[in-house]
Amino acid sequence: MNALIVGGSRGIGAACVRAFTAAGDRAVFTWHSDEGGAKAVCAETHATAVRADAADFAAMSAAVHTAAADMGGRLDALVYNAGVAYYGLLQEMNNADWQRVLDVNLSGAFYACRAALPLMIRQQYGRIVLVSSMWGQTGASCEAAYSAAKAGLIGLGKALAREAGPSGITVNCVAPGAVDTAMMAGFSPADKAALCADIPAGRLGTPEEIARSILFLADEASGYINGQVLGQNGGYVC
């Protein structure tokens, strides 16, 4: 399998690069600001890294075509994992912050899918996995923009599953809950402990757990799973 992971220098994205390459697949991933993380992932996995701002259509389109060319002109799987968060009251959020959250989390997925679809349609095969969030399913106080963008990914995935399904392409979402990544860095140990107390599993998720699900949905054998949302939140959202 030839896979492109958008946002692969750390966290869930880096775990995806490791999972795909460990399975014997070829992987290219994008990064934007974490050059050190990108180099570390490349050294560990021998994957190819492409610098691209997910919020920029031209950069995202170029990254998709560069990745496909690097892997012999074929793109079997696209994983959209790029994301930024904003925590604060909606009335205190400025327009630029709102737009940035939507551009990276949602518009970038549109850009990547738009660039990848002609390749996949020509192949009559493809797997697209969009990384949403449990907050895209339920909404989160003080995370209105993030929740809106992640909910948009679910709508995009369901619509595109119907649109692209006849061409042999599946589109699914994973909706992680609280996962132990850099996005949790702002939480104190006490905050994390309180959060874990509310999660039936009693702990945070790991990037590797999410990556395994993404790898499953990207596999050829998962061809009858389409337009679905796989929640991985330890039972926090049922």
Image: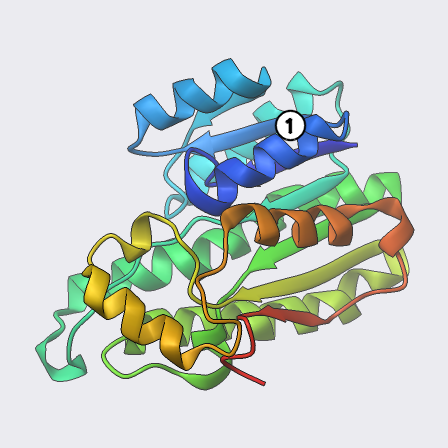
Residue 100 locus on image (x, y percent): 27, 57
Question: Within the image, what quadrant is residue 171 found in?
Answer: bottom right
Q: Amino acid at mark 1?
A: Ala
State the quadrant of the C terminus.
bottom right
Residue pictured at 42% horizontal, 20% vertical? 40
Residue 54 locus on image (x, y percent): 41, 44
Residue pictured at 59% horizontal, 40% vertical? 16
Residue 170 locus on image (x, y percent): 79, 58
Residue pictured at 88% horizontal, 56% vertical? 223
Question: Within the image, what quadrant is residue 1 found in?
Answer: top right
Q: For residue 6, say whether it is visible.
A: no
Compared with 122, 89 (above or below) is below
Q: Is residue 55 left or right of residue 214?
A: left
Question: Within the image, what quadrant is residue 142 found in?
Answer: bottom left
Residue at the far left: name it: 92
Residue tagged by mark 1? 27
Q: Nearer the viewer, residue 49 or 66?
A: 49
Give the class, few, some or many, for how many residues have Cα within 10 Å of label 1's Cα (few <14, many ≥20): many
Residue pictured at 51% horizontal, 81% vertical? 137
Q: Is residue 119 left or right of residue 32?
A: right
Label 1 residue SS: strand
Residue 19 locus on image (x, y percent): 65, 36
Q: Nearer the viewer, residue 7 or 183?
A: 183
Q: Is residue 45 left or right of residue 138?
A: right
Q: For residue 136, say whether it is visible.
A: yes
Compared with 109, 198 (above or below) is below
* Numbered marks: total: 1
Compared with 127, 64 (above or below) is above
